[in-house]
Amino acid sequence: MIASSKKYTTRIGILVHGRHLETKNWEEIVWGKPPTKLGSLPMMVLVALHRGVENIAKVVFGSGASEKDGLKESEYILRYLKNKMARIGEFDHIRNHPRFESYHDLQLLGNLMNTIECQKTSKNTMEEIADAAKVFSKAGIADVIEITCASHAPRCIRDQAVAFEQGLIPQNQLWSIVHGMTTYAHTTAEEVVIIEPPHRGDDPMAKSKIKTHEIFSKLFYDIRETSVKIKTLRAIKTLVEKAVRD
């Protein structure tokens, strides 16, 4: 993604990735665990302080298909944030930030919270990115920061790249990722597995007709029945264990 050749502007847009409301340990992923483990929401506040609250022109809360208490995913997350903002100083990174001590910056931060735009129609990550790109484009924003949890960041980077390839992100917008310090329940960021198409010359799979990324892509996206997925994974697990033993 190439930045515009026009005069650089500090107007920044932030997209906070939605989080399905039935996600295990939802609150810890979204909020985190004070004083050191920032979830997506306090990380958004830290990014705003770090980049200058006055430079944040628009914040969009992304949404998936989940709903709760009659609220869309994004609306529920925004309500949650407003209920927790009084405790944002419990995080060391925020409380110790020099701009957090400024009344002016706190006032700007409060104003920013009141102008957050909630998505209400997007159903998945790709739609979330495409819809947000339109909002930022309309607002004249070319610098976009997407915030998500650590274990989902690789997926968001992939979807940003796909969206740009498909023309869903304007060419003058420069997108980046900032991840919080939380991960999916009972997992670590290290457990995230990334399967790239084989590309190195010394990779024997590069010449193989069977590509690992194609197999797993079909497993997760083409096979609909959970029972079939489990059966397939068990078969793969058995073959791998045998290969390791041999």
Image (spheres, rainbow, N blue to C red):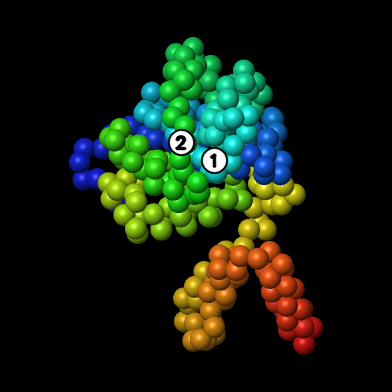
Residue wearing tag 1: 18
Q: Can you name the residue that lies furthest to the right here? A: 245
Residue kind at label 2, given as amino acid type: Gln
Whether residue 202 is visible to the viewer of this picture, yes or no, is no
- Quadrant, the C terminus: bottom right
Q: Is 113 or 231 nearer to us in this picture?
A: 231
Q: Can you name the residue that lies furthest to the left here? A: 6
Residue at the image position 53 percent from the left and 55 percent from the top = 155
Q: Is 185 or 73 nearer to us in this picture?
A: 73
Residue at the image position 46 percent from the left and 43 percent from the top = 122
Mark closer to the chain start, 2 or 1: 1
Residue wearing tag 2: 119
Give above or below for 225 relative to 198.
above
Residue at the image position 76 percent from the left and 78 percent from the top = 238
Asked if the residues shown at circle 2 and circle 1 are in contact, with their CB atoms under 8 angstroms apart, the answer is yes
Q: Which element type, helix, strand or loop, lies under badge 1? A: loop
Q: Can you name the residue that lies furthest to the top here? A: 103
Residue 153's x, y, as percent?
A: 54, 50
Q: Which image quarter: residue 21?
A: top right
Residue at the image position 67 percent from the left and 42 percent from the top = 22
Residue 43's x, y, as percent?
A: 56, 34
Q: Is residue 28 left or right of residue 57?
A: right
Give above or below for 39 relative to 230.
above
